Image: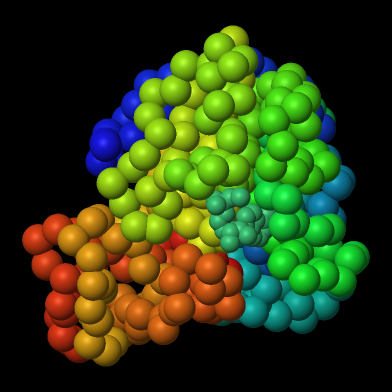
Amino acid sequence: MISLSEAFELTLSKTNILGTETVTISECGGFVLAEDVFSDVSMPPFDKSMMDGYAVRSADCEKTPVTLKIVETIPAGYYPKVVLKPGQASKIMTGAPIPEGADTVQMVEKTEQIATDQVKIFESIPTRKHIAYKSEVMVSGGVVIKKGSVLSPGKIGVLASVGKSSVKIYKRPRVAILVTGSELVEINEKPGTGQIRNSNGYALYEQALNAGCLPTLLSIASDELEQLKANIELGLQSDVLLISGGVSMGEFDLVKDVLDDLGIEFYFDKINIKPGKPTVFGVKDNTLIFGLPGNPVSASTIFELIVRPALRKTIGHAQLSHRVVTAILGKDFNSRTKRECYHPAFVRYEENNFFAAPIKSKGSADIVAFANSNSFIVTNETKQAYEKGELITAVLRNDFWQ
Ligand code: AMP
Ligand code: MG
């Protein structure tokens, strides 16, 4: 049985970028840019005023107060026509071009217009104040966003300013989700005796979606060879197939038999971790196949620790796994297992420290406890019992940042 870190490395070694696709600027947020983006304009396109006030010559304002003659009013969007001479000022608005002859801008708050063509400047001002100079932000023809960047709102603003209405990103994988189990019913049905609703399908769908993929839910497969095989074959048409359930040791856990039958090579079928030990990973042609345990907490945990990093790799991210921090434990905690263990916890950041409160859980079927967590705390074979106030490793899931 392999360790989590071995499973992680092995999975990533079999995972590649899928290609590129072009999406519109409003669809690209959070994805990784697959091309360098160049600017087709200089910014600012001219020396521009960053304040409402008066464009002046600094030398005229050495002794204040001083009265200057207003020779022009320059609103944004207007190009100045008058060249400033000594003793003159142009009234200027934020975003408007600086007139020739001016070398600085005094803000309106430090002036008073005393006649239609006269302004009193109360404070002297050095040259180059409140001016954004031509091309200081970007030069026409220069690279403004590098290939490999994650498209944040700020970068999307840059794309817009250079007129890039569509961009090349790394291709989003199509993720098929297949839940298996003869006890499962759809969510709009009332479970009968011995039945439960399919919750994993929807939780995994959301996880794949917020990992930046294009998920599809296949119909529920019962624990019956032929049906399972037909559904798995359908799922193999996607870039990634996530199967929930049917991978443990029970008589009706048939997923591995079907994968074998289809000639799929597994790289591992167990990870030395709790929860989520019966996890299968294989590859068929270009499809990555993950067989996740049916217990909902196990399936979600393995998704976060193994599947999400692989999905992130396919779309070109450099940061693959969740942030790991050291947190102060909020109450006594005992993991009761010598395996590497990921326990649901609620982590908060306060006064320069992370604090982790373990969530009381009935185990890997306790979806309510898991849903109240935003992180994992991690224990391993070396230490099981922790006291309140001790330091513990915490993995911050996306829920932490919400
Ligand atoms: P299995 O891995 O198939 O042995 O399933 C382990 C446990 O998880 C069983 O109690 C199943 O009923 C439950 N389970 C399996 N699939 C799902 C699912 N899609 N939604 C909710 N629970 C499930
Ligand atoms: Mg099952």
The residue depicted at 34 percent of the width and 26 percent of the height is 10
Front residue (pair 98, 32): 32
Front residue (pair 235, 157): 235
Q: Quadrant of residue 106?
A: bottom right
The residue depicted at 42 percent of the width and 52 percent of the height is 276
Residue 327 is at least partly visible in this image = yes
The residue depicted at 39 percent of the width and 23 percent of the height is 267
Q: Quadrant of residue 363?
A: bottom left
The residue depicted at 32 percent of the width and 30 percent of the height is 9
- Total labels drawn: 0
**Where in the figure is residue 73, as x and y percent of width and height?**
83, 58
Residue 356 lies left or right of residue 222; in this view the side is left
**Residue lying furthest front:** 251
**Where in the figure is residue 229, as x and y percent of width and height?**
71, 26
Residue 286 lies left or right of residue 88; in this view the side is left
Q: Quadrant of residue 227?
A: top right
- Answer above or below: position of 14 versus 327: above
**Where in the figure is residue 338, as x and y percent of width and height?**
18, 61
Front residue (pair 30, 45): 30
